[in-house]
Image (cartoon, helix red, strand yellow):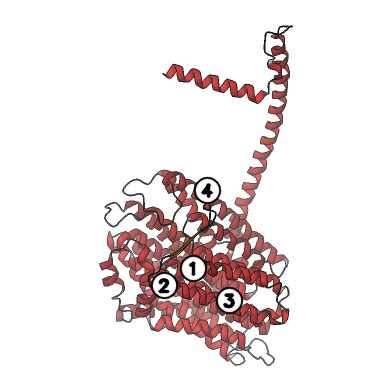
Amino acid sequence: MATVFLLSCVLLPVAGAIGMYWVPERIHKLYMSAVAGFTFFTTLGLYRLVEGGAEIAYRGFWGSPLGLHLEAESFGLLFAALSSFVWFAVTIFSTSYMDMETGKQRFYFFFLLTLAGTLGVTLSADLLTLLLFFELVSLAAYPLVVHKKTGPAYEAGNLYLYMAVAGGMALILGMALVYTDMGTLSLWSEGPGAGETGFLTYLGVGFMVIGFGVKAGMVPLHIWLPKAHPVAPTPASALLSGIMIKTGVFGIIRVINMVFAPDMEALYWGELEAVGLIITFLGVATMLLGVFMALLQENMKKMLACHSVSQIGYILMGIGAAAYLGPLGAVGLSGAIYHTINHALFKAALFLVAGAIYFQTRELNLYRLGGLWKVMPFTAVIGLLASFGIAGVPLFNGYISKTILHHAIVEAAEYENVRLLFTAERIFMLTGAGTACSFIKFYYLLFLRKPQRSYQKIRETRPMQLGMVVLAGAILLFGLGPNLVLERFIEPALDIFVLERHHVETHLLALNFFNLKDLGLVSLSLAGGFIIFFLGMRTGAFHLHLPSWMGGEYIGRRFGDIYRAGWNFASKGYYEGREELTEMRERIGSRGGVVLQSLDRKGGGWANFANLDFDLLLLIFLLLFFLVEYLVAG
């Protein structure tokens, strides 16, 4: 019975997607809400079963090592429950929003397939199963990006697809290398132990981090994300940013834990420390570049997309700090998990706010809007709560996870007094100020500034309000009850990791989030945000644009051009060379046949070698060669 719950988490959205083409159009809204709701409650039920001690797994009935292997455990189920919860809220919102779009059946079909792939990723028990569902997410999300069938939509969708395919190829190559070195693809395999990790494993993990990093939006692999979000329908944007990119984060955590985490008794953690430092600084670069890009955006959905890049940087920094500290990394890992949850909530809510505004005004440019609090008061309140969340205002969820992450990077810096990690902590604070500035600007331009145009009477729809208020309630819950969240959700998710239990209790569960030092630091960050906002608005700095040749997209295109030219050159040489070899083989074959025929004695006695296939002759030659080599060596 428990296995039915596990399979239902993946199969319900698939069945729902197929059923979209069978149910009458008049009940599509109710049908979609029911499918998303049943999926969420099924995932929640599975979570409760595992929480009660049940061990639930499924292996493909055909018994092949290549069969699907699913397993329910606390860490993956936390991601699954989060994904299905946000999907449910966004689905309710979409039942009103999609009235302005065409092709709703197609949209919802791929919308539910993407949910199935996302849940499959979180429930995978080996890398092969994870890869299959990960690629399902990549392919099913493409029609969501190009849904409007406009030129910019296809351009963004093609870039997304190229990046997704490249990431998938990197994942396959990385998996092959790790399997060659470790002999397993199971996510539950023990680490190789002291000094046993080979070069192939390092190389394989590097390729897999690249593959997962593409989906996560990690710098410099982020270039698809700011282009895909503005062109996709808002419900798709909310899920691409709030949930789908988290599959990349999930994959990175899984792979690093699988390969590099030795037993608690192991004395050698140096490999994990090196990996942790690399990921920490990838995270720092991602968070800083993302917030810098966001400050210069005029399109509100593109601005939110750039902040997704930045917030993924926070999460990567936490993962890196946790890996660097090894068994003492509970704070960093918990901060990364907590911020993953928080980002899914406030970023999805912010995209829904942007979608509600676009639904009523058909405008995405921040500088052409203003004064919306008068005509959209409910949306204004949700926008304020979500902005407080992402800016890290105390009593809201972002403050809690950012405080944990700040403690993590300070712990990592003080562990061996690494100066570069202290620099990372300063960049963390600077990014916090930039984030605060960005959402002061966001809220001011949309809701508080004098209106730039007149608005007709606006009536906010109930499904949109319900979808937004569900997410806003979770933002408040995860901000007001941090210790409850840590004990109820985060601590159980740490069970699969090799962590020092005493450190979890004394450094994580005993954290006081509302002490004067932490409140002072966030106040400093918020004050810095107001200062940057004031200077940026007065000087016009927010309207500056970098030259196109400095952009990641430009660089990516140039690399693509170089790759294409190299491939064309190599393939041309290959085909020309193959033709030459074919002609040479034919000449040798015809002349060799004449020579062999001359050896035949008329009347029999000699074998007719000319009648033997060339490949068979080659095989005979190789066998003779190996026989001679064996006799000589013996």
Q: Nearer the viewer, mark 1 or mark 4?
A: 4
**Residue for badge 1:** 310
Q: Horizontal and vertical percent for residue 356?
A: 62, 83
Q: Would you say the residues marked 2 and 1 are in contact, meaning their CB atoms lie under 8 Å apart?
A: no
Q: Earlier in the sequence, mark 2 or mark 1?
A: 1
Q: Residues within 10 Å of mark 4 (few under 14, many from 20)?
A: some
Tag shown at residue 126: none
| Distance Cα–Cα, label 2 vs label 1 | 16 Å
Quadrant of the rendered image containing residue 225: bottom right
| Distance Cα–Cα, label 1 vs label 4 | 28 Å
- Amino acid bearing label 4: Leu
Nearer-the-camera pick, 113 or 216: 113
What SS does tag 2 mark?
Answer: helix
**Residue for badge 4:** 173
User: Against 207, is 344 above or below?
Assistant: below
Q: Nearer the viewer, mark 1 or mark 3?
A: 3
| Distance Cα–Cα, label 2 vs label 4 | 31 Å
Q: Earlier in the sequence, mark 1 or mark 3?
A: 3
* Horizontal relation, residue 498 to residue 130: left or right: left
Quadrant of the rendered image containing residue 516: bottom left
**Residue for badge 3:** 36
Residue visible at 65% across and 86% down? Answer: 452
* Horizontal relation, residue 544 to residue 488: left or right: right
Q: Which of marks 2 and 1 is in front?
A: 2
Tag shown at residue 338: 2
Q: Earlier in the sequence, mark 2 or mark 3?
A: 3
